[in-house]
Amino acid sequence: MIPLSFAQRRIWFLDQLEGPSAAYNIAVSLRLTGEVDEPALRAALEDVVERHESLRTVIAIRDGEPSQLILEDVLPELIRARVTQDGLSRAMSDAAAYCFDLAEEIPLRVTLFEVAPDSHVLLIVLHHIAADGWSMAPLLRDLSTAYAARHRGTTPDFPELPGQYADFAMWQREVLGSEDDPTSVLGEQLAYWREALDGSPAELVLPYDRPRPAVPSHRGRTVPFSVDAEVHRALLKLARERGVTLFMVLHAALAVLLSRLGAGDDLPVGAPVAGRSDEGLDDLVGFFVNTVVLRTDVSGDPSFVELLERVREVHLGAHAHADVPFDRLVDALGVERSAARQPLFQVMVVLQNNVRGRLDLPGLDVAVEPVELGSAKFDLTLQLAEECGPDGAPDGLNGALEYAVDIFDEETARTLAGRFARVLEAVAADASVRVDEVDVLLPGECERLSGWSVAGRSGELVTLPE
């Protein structure tokens, strides 16, 4: 019997608790311009699924315990659909929202949308239990290799993988040991987290538009925002000068925003860690990522530079103890589980710094096609990615704020994203600014507030701006 990894077990537990949903789907969509060799594409999918056992694994219950069941001779289906350009976005979103049955079907679903004879969109949807963001690069690379070979009428010559995901799951349990053993890796790291998260708030006060439902729908949307190249360069310069990473600067800016919005001085947020501690894991498709809680103290009205020092210590401590599976951490801390909200944190911050996957198919021009998943794991997820110019120079930050539609309106999410960008501009201009002095007002809001103040003194009825 092959046990689930700790990360897989958490996803499986949530699937059992809440029922199948698209909240833990990963999707990549690519526009293919030119003539698609469908037989080659089908064969290439078979090659990739054969190469990566995680893509042909289902979850079986044996003696009351979930385990990995690796299937043999799997023929993944290439679903074909014809759509108009106007109907493409909706068709892609519907397909990306597919709910996998983890016990009965492989965690991979591929659809080829035909928009015109020489224009297709390839949508690859995976369940998180089988893959993470890092996995997209080796997945697309192997698909490229296999398609090129099948298009030539040959079989792909893949380099041998050092192992499979099931090997990692076994190794993980052996290395971490038992949480009951205080000298084990797991025992020592749990001791750190018990101290680090002692008394941490169970829920942040956020500017919700309506009460949290007892059972979340996990429906979500995203609003985009961007930061220009000048601010990007200034933030990188600040990071170098203070001996921190860009991610630490971004996290500190988020802490400033949350504090200024009234969330308090004790601010736990979640962040992913790659979980690939050995380079031999880099080429595997699998769910290695873990989640850590970054608890930041913003009390005492520190300057942004002082806050960066606090954030730096939080990050170093968290990453030094990042082997504890998040679900084990929740259990060990005795946190009361609630179907209504995520335990330990409700806001996630992500800097996408994985190698970006690239699909190269002979005879085809390939470009990314945006797809809306329509789901949200957390109340808010702040996602950022660095952009570089042709010369490799910093060229700005692209961001997206994912929000749970159960509790936030789109306008609120847009305002929050705009305020975060405003904080980045403020600290890039003056890193010595104190937290309580950071300007989070959007353009025009100061004038409206000034007008309200004048109107209020004149005795007229006015409306308080939100």
Image: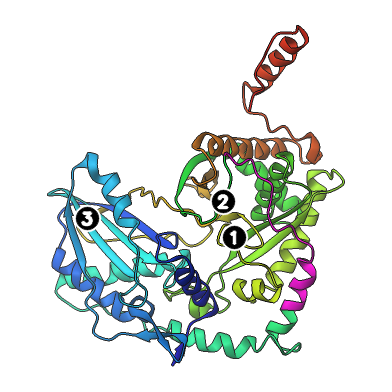
Q: Are marks 2 and 1 in contact (CB under 8 Å)?
A: yes
Identify residue type, mark 2.
Answer: Asp
Residue placed under numbered mark 1 in the picture: 342
Determine which quarter of the picture holds residue 143: bottom left
Identify residue type, mark 1.
Answer: Gln
Residue 237 in sight from this viewpoint: no
Q: CA distance from mark 3 to mark 1?
A: 43 Å
Q: Position of residue 259 (x, y in %)?
A: 74, 44
Residue placed under numbered mark 2 in the picture: 379
Q: Secondary structure at mark 1?
A: loop
Horizontal side, residue 314 vs residue 164: left or right: right
Q: CA distance from mark 2 to mark 1?
A: 8 Å
Residue placed under numbered mark 3 in the picture: 364
Find the magenta span and give its range: 190-209
- Pointer 3 or 1: first along the chain: 1
Please name the residue shown 65% across and 53% down the image. Answer: 246
Query: Residue 195 lies in magenta, yes or no?
Result: yes
